[in-house]
Amino acid sequence: MNAAINEEMHCVAAEPHSVFLHVGVVLADRSEEVAYETAVLGRLRHGYRVFQLRNALGTRIELCHLLVHITFGSLPNHWTTPRQLRVKAARLEQKLKRSTSELQSSTSTFDEPPSPVRQGSQNAKSVRIVSSQGDPA
């Protein structure tokens, strides 16, 4: 997840004490990370926090800090059980079969040759093609 300055970033973690948050500062062309800090997500507290950043070797950089605002929330668990997934897959498969058969039946009507139009019939239409300049083609 890449967030720029003044952008929000959301991280959903089922086990926050097992998730590491890596905050890095990269050059504008994203070619190199110049500073970073890592923290366990579950150990962070709500509110404004200051991360003292480190160089690529892991040494803290003097007078190099990053101010972040941390908020926590919860999301409802909408995970489905394997049985629910199988039922949904079966329904979608049935719907796909119905749609396929309907499509095949509707395309079979286009495979039939068109009925000839008798000259002088009321169904006969004449078409005049006009070019984009308005001159008859």
Image (tube, rainbow, N blue to C red):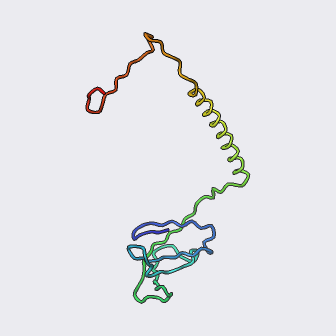
Q: Residue furthest right?
A: 83
Left-right relation of 104 to 116: right
Say which quadrant the C terminus sits in. top left
Left-right relation of 131 to 16: left
Above-or-below relation of 130 to 62: above
Task: Indicate whether 48 appears above or below 86.
Answer: below
Q: Residue at x 57, y 76 (%)?
A: 20
Q: Residue at x 39, y 71 (%)?
A: 5
Q: How many marks?
A: 0
- Residue 100 position within the rendered picture, expressed as x and y whole percent measured from the top left: 63, 37
Q: Is 57 left or right of 112, judged from the image as shown? A: left
Q: Nearer the viewer, residue 102 or 116?
A: 116
Q: Nearer the viewer, residue 4 or 130?
A: 130
Q: Position of residue 99 (x, y in %)?
A: 62, 36
Closer to the camera, 8 or 48? 8
Picture coordinates of residue 29 (x, y %)?
39, 73
* Residue lying at the far top of the rendered structure: 120
